[in-house]
Image (cartoon, rainbow, N blue to C red):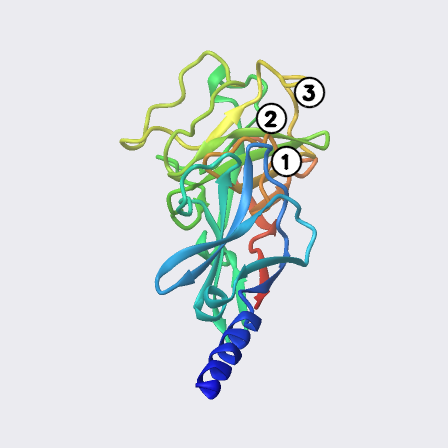
Amino acid sequence: MVFALTAFFVACSNNDNEPTTGNLTINLDGLEELGTDFVYEGWLIVNGAPVSTGTFTSVTFPQTFSVGFNDLEAATKFVLSIEPKNDTDPAPSKTKILAGDFSGNTATVNSNIVGDFSNSWGKFILATPTDGMNNNERSGVWFLTPGTPPTAGLGLPELEDGWKYEGWAVINGKPVTTGKFTKLSATDEFGGFSGVNALPAPNGPDGFFPGEDFLTNAPDGQTFPTDLRGATIVISVEPSPDDSPAPFALKPLAKKVATDAVDHSPIDLGAGPKASITGSVKR
């Protein structure tokens, strides 16, 4: 009986000393701050189900989180998502930005879950179709390839739910949107700066092409019409929904317009400043 009681107390003592939590360290390169209504949230995939590792807003790394020890040991994958700040849904949103499988105690993560932009290409023209021909023609940008009829000016992968493309003109150092879009040969979601004339006849069931004329309702610090020569044209990949007025970190295509650029002539977009976000997660 003495031996049995001793063994019982030793076993209890050993169980009490076993760790219940462990550390998960996240180290990412290229992530940028979100709008005020959203946060990043990490997830471990354990037996096929997501387990939250916590939320964060700072993009200074490395960052360490305390996670249940058993979940940490059993996890096969790490995923990072973008969530509403006051989220009541316990599951990850559709807006997943990073993912990677664990190999031993490390997961190498990247943004290929959003899309592979390594072979992306683009063209645009300077033109203002919404105020007629030969009026302020260098004050608008349209992502198309000229021809009869014109064709798509962007070669980009189709995005998953939770993401949209957005065009930008960086004018006098400030980014001004041309609108968000998901289809490359369709009218985008914004027309707040364009003139009153209708866009050219649609070339397909989804309308014209992404782009914008900068003619009216200029934002603070801008004057419309403008001259886009010397401006930088950018395509970004944006979370959806998104409350930030600035371009998101992923910018696969960009081009500074030459000072002698000719309107209605195709201009090639080049590689943007950030086509991929990478990092590592250690347990």
The residue type indicated by label 2 comes to Arg
Residue 267 placed where, x, y %?
56, 41
Query: Is 115 situated left or right of 280 in this image?
Result: left
Kindly report the distance in space between the C-alpha atoms of the residues bearing marks 1 and 3. 21 Å
Q: Secondary structure at mark 2?
A: loop
Query: Mark 1 or mark 2: which comes first in sequence?
Result: 2
Residue extending farthest top: 196
Q: Secondary structure at mark 3?
A: loop
Mark 1 touching mark 2, by CB under 8 A?
A: yes
The residue type indicated by label 3 comes to Gln
Considering depth in this image, is 213 or 45 the residue closer to the camera? 45
Please tell me how crowded label 3 is: few (under 14), some (14-19), or many (20+) other residues with Cα within 10 Å: some
Image point 52% across, 22% down: which residue? 128
Image point 68% across, 35% down: which residue? 260
Considering depth in this image, is 137 or 60 the residue closer to the camera? 60
Read off the residue under disc 3. Answer: 222
Read off the residue under disc 1. Answer: 261
Kindly report the distance in space between the C-alpha atoms of the residues bearing marks 2 and 3. 15 Å
Residue 150 placed where, x, y %?
39, 36
Read off the residue under disc 2. Answer: 138
Task: Quarter of the image for the C terminus: give it.
Answer: bottom right
Mark 1 or 3: in front is 3
Kindly report the distance in space between the C-alpha atoms of the residues bearing marks 1 and 2. 9 Å
